[in-house]
Amino acid sequence: MTITRRRQPGKGLLLQSLALRLLIAACVLAGPAGTSRAGEVTAAPTDASPLSQCELYPLAVGTQWTFQSGPLIVRERVVQHEDFQGERCARIDTIFDDQLVAYEHIAVRDDGVYRVAVSGKPIQPPLKMISLPAKPGTKWTVDSTVAGQAIRGEFVSSEGTFSVRSRGGDADTTFKTYRVTGEKMTAGGTTLSLVYDFVPKFGKVKQVARTGSVETTLELKDYQAPGQVPTRSADRGGSLLR
């Protein structure tokens, strides 16, 4: 898989960027969640909740994404479904170097997928990250607060592409994505831009966060559905999104 980056960050910058993209990928600059060991996955519930049935961003307990940023590997994992301020949410842990560096709570509503909290801090009101039904040309505004920081801007949806490179010499495989772009957003007085790409049944496949001259790109390297062995990987002949 080809990772396109403006700058290769060190470990310290990656941790800072993780906080950045989760608090505006949720949109606000804040410190990481800490350096505790990553927790175990709670057993998946048996009910068919909207969290488990959201095709564009599958959030069943045990779902895991492995992302690459230059030489660095970051994992995101749905560890449990739990109520947060009266709303059923999926808790997603972000893990780097086997350490929990951030976590977020995501809810699925009829009109979209919402980020409800980041690292235990509620977002008021919750921030819509995907508009449902998903279609290009949809715009929505963001005007929220988290940890005393204002988050403002506009998201717009469009079609994008995501390419998987084959190790076996075959041609690259390109997939159509649902893309969400937030340009000239502000978070705590800082100007930011975000681009997310989602593929049905696999969720987020790419994310680009930029502030000033610093740009961080994460691209999906491996996806694992609950109970799936082995995982579907971009390293296996482009089979990741099939």
Image (cartoon, helix red, strand yellow):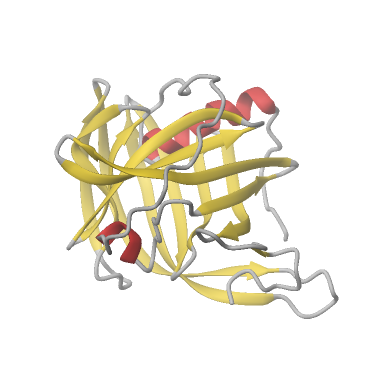
Counting labels gives 0
Depicted 212 relative to depicted 188: above or below = below
Identify the residue shown where x is 57% and y is 59%: 224
Image coordinates of residue 128 in percent, x first then y, are 25, 50
- The image quadrant where one finds the C terminus is bottom right
Corner quadrant of residue 22: top left
* Image coordinates for residue 59, horizontal then vertical, percent: 39, 55
Q: Is residue 90 above or below residue 152?
A: below
Horizontally, is 41 left or right of 181 in the view?
right
Q: Is residue 81 above or below residue 219?
A: above
Residue positioned most to the bottom:
171
Judging depth in this view, the residue of 44 and 136 nearest the camera is 44
Q: What residue is shown at x 69% (from left), y 64% (from top)?
A: 234
148 left or right of 192?
left
Residue at left offset 33%, top offset 72%: 136
For the N terminus, the quadrant is bottom right
Q: Give x and y (percent) for residue 61.
A: 42, 51
- Residue at image position (64%, 62%) is 229
User: Which quadrant of the structure image shows residue 55?
Assistant: bottom left
- Taking the image as shown, residue 197 lies to the left or right of residue 46, namely right
- Hey, which quadrant is residue 149 in on the image? top left
Image location (x, y in percent) of residue 15: 57, 27
Residue 32 or residue 48, whichever sits in front: 48
Determine whether, in the image, residue 231 is placed left or right of residue 57: right
Q: Is residue 224 above or below residue 89?
A: below
